[in-house]
Image (spheres, coloured by chain):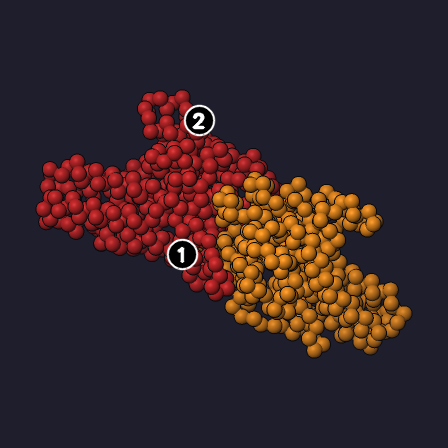
Chain colours: A orange, B red
Amino acid sequence: MGASFTTVGWHQGRVRLIDQRQLPDKVVYLDCADYRDVAEAIRNLSVRGAPAIGITAAMGLALGAQSLAGRDPSRFQEDLTRIADELAATRPTAVNLFWALDRMKRVASSHRHLGVDVLIRQLVDESQAILDEDIAMNRAMGAIGATFIESGDTVLTHCNAGALATGGYGTALGVIRAAWEDGKKIRVIADETRPVLQGARLTAWELMQDAIPVTLITDNMAGALMRAGKIQRCIVGADRIAANGDVANKIGTYSVAVLAHHHAIPFYVAAPTSTLDLSIPSGAHIPIEARNPREVTHIRDVAHVAPEGVAVDNPAFDVTPADLITAIITEKGAFRPRDIHRLGGDPASLTAYRLA
Amino acid sequence: MGASFTTVGWHQGRVRLIDQRQLPDKVVYLDCADYRDVAEAIRNLSVRGAPAIGITAAMGLALGAQSLAGRDPSRFQEDLTRIADELAATRPTAVNLFWALDRMKRVASSHRHLGVDVLIRQLVDESQAILDEDIAMNRAMGAIGATFIESGDTVLTHCNAGALATGGYGTALGVIRAAWEDGKKIRVIADETRPVLQGARLTAWELMQDAIPVTLITDNMAGALMRAGKIQRCIVGADRIAANGDVANKIGTYSVAVLAHHHAIPFYVAAPTSTLDLSIPSGAHIPIEARNPREVTHIRDVAHVAPEGVAVDNPAFDVTPADLITAIITEKGAFRPRDIHRLGGDPASLTAYRLA
């Protein structure tokens, strides 16, 4: 069972995206023919979710490469780097964005001898490979993560780490999807996830598409439900994971982790290894995007909910320290956060550190 | 310094309320000539906040008494009880509602020999006394609570426990107001308080009216700000306090208390003794109102934020256990939650248990 919609993909030579700003009211697809449209779609949250941003940026760079057909090879490489920089500047926190663009740039530079036309085809293929691998990784992660979920569990998730945040299966919701496919009777509690309401608009919608039972709550209800014994596990995605296992994810994730810790409820992070940033020792080094105050003072840019001129804080992400995380579930296995740096080393040695 | 608006009061023989549903966009007053209009205003949240609900219900009962002019005395008492029951059925959690109506009924029954006309005047006077005492209690509470706040502090508050929630000064915001009047340089962080957004719409507005510095955040940002060392104290109001010091207050209060505990940040509750319900041993006995799912799926009844037909939980309140509360600040002093039941005993013995 995959999702019944397309988050991002090639469609008749264009990059097709479901416009997540319009969900759940309307299912509208955006077809981007220009890399600038792709950059704008990332910036304005038409597409969001760390893995989906990476895939989309890779496809955007392939579109950019197409626009450079006919350039001489060295000019091609230069202009491609400029376009990659432009795409990289759209959002600061999700490391998959930089990971995907670096991977695309490596293809271009390592095959520079092949000629521009061949390179362009290779870049389009590479972006498709990133998408295909993402879905395969999500399914692997789902199978691993599902072992942590028992029939009868109610699982809380924050934001949207689903098919809409990835190539089409999901990280946190991929684990939930896999448990559901295994026949486990589970229920999902979706935090609405202010200010942009990814939980209410996207997670609830996505789970309802697949008839997985979901109940929507406001972010501030999670603690009371935990105290009432109504939540057995929490699972979220990640935008960046530092070498020590600290996890940056959507604002509010940290509060959920503290609440879960207080109630002795397991708290899992599901993320592909492309989310790892072993170059930084801890979460303190992860840049946190501050977004427009209007996201807080308005809701869906329509309803005005605060006095004119009020001061606002609007960090888009927070960092959950490793010691509040029960396990990080990747496509290579589930690990204790303190062991996550081993994923950068010898794959053969990983077995000893795998939890499942 | 009191607030620059009227939350509730008598105005030309009618009960005047600021329509809190329309804040902060419009300042509109409702003038109620019939007790049924008062009941509806409580039910639909035109007026909210435990102390304000109590005052409003008392004035509503006085209006009801006026409508009974000319009745024979025993019929008057019967009909008054029926009207009180109707007002009591508007909302289940705030105990001040029942406290105020009981106080009014006692006036009516203990002076039943005086004749209906005199009784009606006494009930109007009693409702005004409840308002006047509320303001005096809030000021006393403010003076006591302000001693817990230091210049330089940033104080987080949840929901609105301000002038808008009371007779005109505030419980939690009364403490903040008093610290500000003392010349302490403080800042306030206001949680927006989904689903009804009392923090964004009311607390931010109320503090801006009085030029007290306030920054608005979504509920799920509080943890990240605490971790960053940006919050020194938390203070909230209460809808009902059990004999063991457990506190029912707006949904999300419990999460703030757990987060404060995790970060060793003092967490205060400010509430008049009319909020105490010593008849119940613990918070487990406090009825929690479940409100319309539409409050969650829509925002301000305008912006639709969730898929059609999604399941929703919408408890309006939660219970914070006594052990997460640093002190309960009342007009009679500040107390450790475990000592709060002593307020039902000999006032002379209280001194030993006072914190400030």
Q: Residue at x 62, y 56 (%)?
A: A179
Q: Residue at x 82, y 62 (%)?
A: A106
Side of B297 relative to B341 (left or right): right
Q: Position of residue B176 (x, y in %)?
A: 44, 39
Q: Amino acid type of disc 1?
A: Asn
Q: Residue at x 69, y 59 (%)?
A: A138
Mark 2, other Cα within 10 Å: few <14 / some 14–19 / many ≥20: some
Q: Position of residue B94 (x, y in %)?
A: 35, 43
The quarter of the picture where the N terminus of chain A appears is bottom right
Q: Position of residue B257 (x, y in %)?
A: 50, 39
Side of A115 relative to A270 (left or right): right
Is residue B78 positioned above or below A29 on the image? above
Q: Nearer the viewer, residue B278 or B229?
A: B278
Q: Position of residue A275 (x, y in %)?
A: 71, 54
To the question of a shared chain for discs 1 and 2, the answer is yes
Badge 2 element = loop
Q: CA distance from mark 1 to mark 2?
A: 40 Å
Residue B355 image label = 2
Q: Residue at x 51, y 68 (%)?
A: A25
Side of B248 relative to A206 (left or right): left
Q: Nearer the viewer, residue B270 or A311?
A: B270
Residue B292 image label = 1
Is residue B330 positioned above or below B51 on the image? above
Q: Is residue A53 at least partly visible in the picture?
A: no
Q: Is residue A266 at least partly visible in the picture?
A: yes
